Amino acid sequence: KARNERFMGRDDLNLLVGYHFDHYSLAIDNYDSADYTSGAKTARTTSTGGETRTHALFAQLGWDFIPHWDVALGARYERWETIDGYYYRYNTMTFNDFADRSETGISPKFSLGFDPDGPWHFRYSLAKAYRFPIVEELYHNANSILGTTIANATLDPEVGVHHNLSIEREIPRGFARVNLYHERIKDAIWSQTDVTSVPTVTTFLPVDEVTTSGVELVVQQDRVFEVPLDVRFNVAYTDSEVTKNDADPSVEGNVFPRMPKWRANLLGTWHVSPKLDTSLGLRYASDSYGNLDNSDKVDQVYGAQDKYLFVDVKANYQVTPAAKIALGIDNLTDEVAFVAHPWPQRTFYVQGSVDF
């Protein structure tokens, strides 16, 4: 991508342009085994795979059109393709080759900012965005003692319309910001795992419409109370609802899975010396559902979506201007919580880095 801060020689115009390309492939062969402990393979049972490819062009023009006001207009054009998808089941002699597909999408963006004299800043943003299916959602079919995965080669792209209103106030050595957000996503792709069956079954389902609204508070301040303490804090309340689902209308009005009502993070960093920093972090999320029907209400089991409060500690030491080391502990209290699978429990780590 490229950016010009003085587009056409004007101080009030800036331009950002760019190109994006990605190409993903998946190929999985499954075999029977007479002795799985040694990794011995016998007959091949299934083969599955395929490719996706995306080309995208994007541009954004910013204009400070009058004092204290600025506007940004942008767009992103994407062409997405699926290539050579297949699913072969040799035990039943079933061979499925999926037709290649292509989709295009244009995602416009609008942003209006107001910066009056003083500590206040305001911005409203509106954008449309596409999220195209990935190769795992389209082509990852598997059937083993570990579980069954059923892909969906007919999935459509997610299409979302997103609104955000930001109100920010400068404070000494930092800022406080409130974000109000609302989004509506059509054809949301949902990965559902039934952990009550043996083996587990994972499917990829389109949900016709999911509507999400919420509010977030962000506060950052350096040298709180004039001591060498920096604080970063955010808390968000989110209400996410399945507003349309023709395939199963009974889930309409339910909470969309894996969307906690409350999330919060707190990070405090104490500058012990010019070379040594220590930090304490808290991560919190409230209980949420794992299933579209909101029937999963049991916590502390595989497949659950538990609330959690994790405590993390870390120390950074600047050995030289170019080298530093860090020691840390994540989940200091060794709390047990699940997000379908278990969250990592108490974890010790050492980091080192050198800048050239």
Image (cartoon, rainbow, N blue to C red):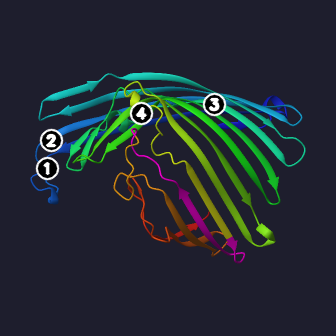
Residue 109 screen position, x and y as percent: 66, 29
Q: Which residue is mark 1?
A: 41
Q: Earlier in the sequence, mark 1 or mark 3?
A: 1
Q: Which residues are magenta?
A: 270-293
Say what amino acid the circle numbered 3 marks.
Ala
Mark number displayed over residue 127: 3
Q: Which residue is mark 2?
A: 44
Q: Earlier in the sequence, mark 3 or mark 2?
A: 2
x 20%, y 43%: residue? 30
Q: Which residue is mark 4?
A: 251
| Circle 2 SS class | strand
Query: Counting other residues with Cα less than 10 Å from the Cα at mark 2, is it few (<14), some (14-19), or many (20 or more)?
Result: some
Q: Earlier in the sequence, mark 4 or mark 3?
A: 3
Examine the rendered structure and indicate whether residue 20 appears above or below residue 328.
above
Q: What is the CA distance from the residue labelled 4 to the residue labelled 3?
A: 27 Å
Residue 40 screen position, x and y as percent: 13, 54
